Image (tube, helix red, strand yellow):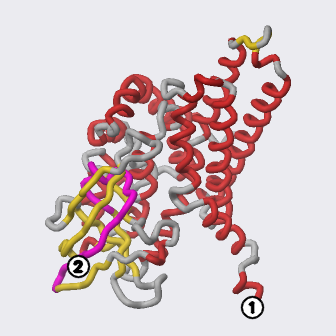
Amino acid sequence: MTIYTPDHLELQRSARKLIESEINPHVDEWEHAGIFPAHEVFSKFGALGLLGITKPKEFGGLELDYTYSVAFAEVLGEITCGGVPLAIGVQTDMCTPALSLHGSDALRAEFLSPSISGDYVGCIGVSEPSAGSDVSRIKTTARKDGDDYVIDGGKLWITNGAQADWMCMLANTSDGPPHKSKSLIVVPLKSPGVTIPRKLDKLGMRCSDTAQIFFDGVRVPQRNRIGEEGMGFIYQMQQFQEERMWAAASVLRPMDRAVQEAIDYTGARIAFGKRILDNQSVRFRLSELQTKIEMLRSLIYRAVQEYASGADVTTLASMAKLSAGRLVREVADACLQYYGGMGFMNETPISRLYRDGRVASIGGGADEVMLEIISKRLGMSDKQRKA
């Protein structure tokens, strides 16, 4: 099954050419440095129109349906690390969807257009020390003062945070119920009162900069609010649908590559007088893993098709995200085992997937959150049973 037309495949070919010539040759260097030049890299993808695939043409986008965005997410998996694709995904599918759909024309001209071109790097500011997957518990506030919001608080685990020009921030703008008290606000990160005390040291995604950011009396014009005040929680839940489908699609090619490389390695490695691949248990396990990858691919494609048709795919997107996070861990662990001692070496590509893939079950909503969403959608919550 495929949802890709010749136009989708042409988009992937354009991206693949850039990846092979301008990105993959530098990945090892960026991984070692713990950061990659986001503005330089984003401008290359922006020049091909790949940072605004679903965005309005009037702001520099291609205005294509979401199937094209997922085609791009999938081909980004051909980058030989997880950090660069993650950073690009934050730009395209995590910090800009609400701005594109609900932002004023002036706000979109100021922040969306340069993000589509790659001149600006964006980030999404939701997580805090006491509020990761539980978005309703965020503490950052934005109080009105004249025509401005004055923002106080802090955000944690912010991908692109050390290099970003702006943040799509979720903040409390009233004291009302948790789901109606929040707004999304575009915050320029060069504003007085913004401090970035440290770039975080992570298990994986080494070349993707992740920061802790503090806000102390940061003044932002109220015109920087995205859409209606108090609708931020709803807008963010909408953004999560795209983020979760993107996250699932982005690990398909790395898993394909992991299985194929394991086949190649075990087909060449001799142990106890025969190839490792000649052991039935190895052949069967690798076959099983590839089968699971194809099943996940079909689930993602179904979710994407329904989303592009205007359907609510919260359940399917959550299922895809849950399945992807668990499967990439299973594939990386199983394939690494067949490398023996070499699998434990950083120089072996499978060890990078083992590290990078672990975050797939945490970021964008942990596995447990996905299961809670799915169970509620299936009518299994305590409140639903009592009603």
Q: Crowding at label 1, few (<14), some or many (≥20) Cα neighbours within 10 Å?
A: few
In the shown orientation, is residue 185 left or right of residue 304? left
Residue at 18% in and 74% down: 219
Residue at 46% in and 75% down: 233
Q: Give the farthest residue toward the right.
A: 280
Q: Is residue 314 magenta?
A: no
Q: Which residue is mark 1?
A: 387
Residue 322 percent location from the top left of the image:
65, 56
Amino acid type of the residue tagged 2 in the rendering: Tyr
Q: Which residue is mark 2?
A: 149
Q: Quadrant of residue 195?
A: bottom left
Res 180 seen here: yes
Res 60 seen here: no
**Magenta-tinted stretch:** 146-167
Please tell me how many numbered marks the rendered image carries: 2
Secondary structure, mark 2, is strand
Residue 60 percent location from the top left of the image:
33, 50
Residue at 53% in and 58% down: 242
Q: Are marks 2 and 1 in contact (CB under 8 Å)?
A: no
Above/below status of 32 relative to 172? above
Q: Quadrant of residue 232?
A: bottom left
